[in-house]
Image (spheres, rainbow, N blue to C red):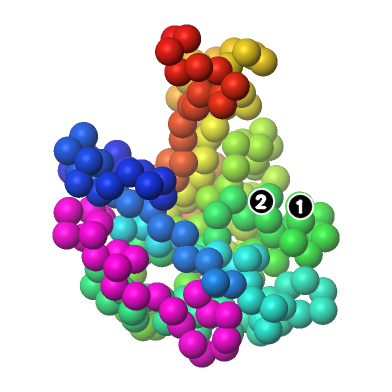
Amino acid sequence: GSFFGIQGGGIPPEALARIGAKWYRSFRFWRWLESRQGALTLAEPAWLPWRTNGFNLMETLTVTVMPDWAKGPDGKVGDLNAFNAFALGVASRLDTNARYFEIENEPDLVFPSSARLTTAEGAAYYAEVLRSAAKALRAKDPGLVILGSGVSGGDFENWAFSKEVFSRAADAFDVWSFHPYAPTRNLGPKGLSVSPEDNRMREKLLDAEAKVKEWGGRQRLWVGELGWAFDVREPVSSA
């Protein structure tokens, strides 16, 4: 099957299916889907058009965009069981329509910043959340696939965040879903984009594969995000 997928957007699923896209990544923001504890507002129209058009679903469950009632005084999740209940609620509502669940988007950026932590402290916090949520989801259905440490391009420099996550939670996730963006990826008047070759894309992927073995993991690799874009100040016709 095709590895090609899309994240959000506003493009009709019928159009994306025609160009060969097979995956759709949805962000499930805890803050907006469970503004009142125990009252999950996730309805069939959020996924049915994609499934009807033959898409597989990757569900990204956000932790740091949490409802006020769930936040502790230190900025962290006050009770991990509350997030677990949210994750289980989403998985139950989607039922067999979704088998792939990612715990947070680019945690190397949002976990340290959301609770004013260092990179190492943020990674330890994330590993704790990841282990707890994965255990809950697997107890519901051992066949669910857990994606984790979906870090930004910045972590590729020295793997400071991911290395810590693997040391604490290597057995908690099945897929390492990182984002190997180039440092400059906009085509526009303020600079040239960096090509895959200049971004050392092949070397980065091979290094990630080697790191999984070095850190004692068993994860498959999945490029969760990657792309280049036009700078909004540049006319599309200029190309």
Give the left or right position of residue 20, taking residue 231 as reference: left
Q: Tag 1, which secondary structure?
A: helix
Q: Position of residue 5 (x, y in %)?
A: 32, 43
Q: Which portion, as a residue range, is magenta?
A: 33-56
**Residue 150 in sight:** yes
Q: Nearer the viewer, residue 179 or 209?
A: 179
> Within the image, what quadrant is residue 69 found in?
bottom right
Residue at 77% x, 71% y is 75
- Residues at discs 2 and 1 in contact (Cβ within 8 Å): yes
Circle 1: is it few (<14), some (14-19), or many (20+) Cα within 10 Å?
Answer: some
Residue 20, magenta (yes or no): no
Q: Amino acid at mark 2?
A: Asp
Where does the N terminus fall, quadrant-wise?
A: top left
Q: Amino acid at mark 1?
A: Thr
Give the left or right position of residue 144, taking residue 200 as reference: left
Q: Which residue is mark 1?
A: 119
Where does the C terminus fall, quadrant-wise?
A: top left
- Mark with earlier residue (2, 1): 2
> Within the image, what quadrant is residue 93 found in?
bottom left
Q: In the rendered view, would you say 45 is above or below 212?
A: below
Give the left or right position of residue 145, taking residue 128 as reference: left
C-alpha separation, residue under disc 2 versus residue under disc 1? 7 Å
Q: Nearer the viewer, residue 57 or 233?
A: 233
Residue at 33% x, 44% y is 11
Q: Position of residue 6 (x, y in %)?
A: 36, 44
Residue 40, magenta (yes or no): yes
Q: In the rendered view, would you say 30 is above or below 153?
A: below
Q: Position of residue 28 (x, y in %)?
A: 47, 65
Q: Which residue is mark 2?
A: 108
**Residue 129 in sight:** no
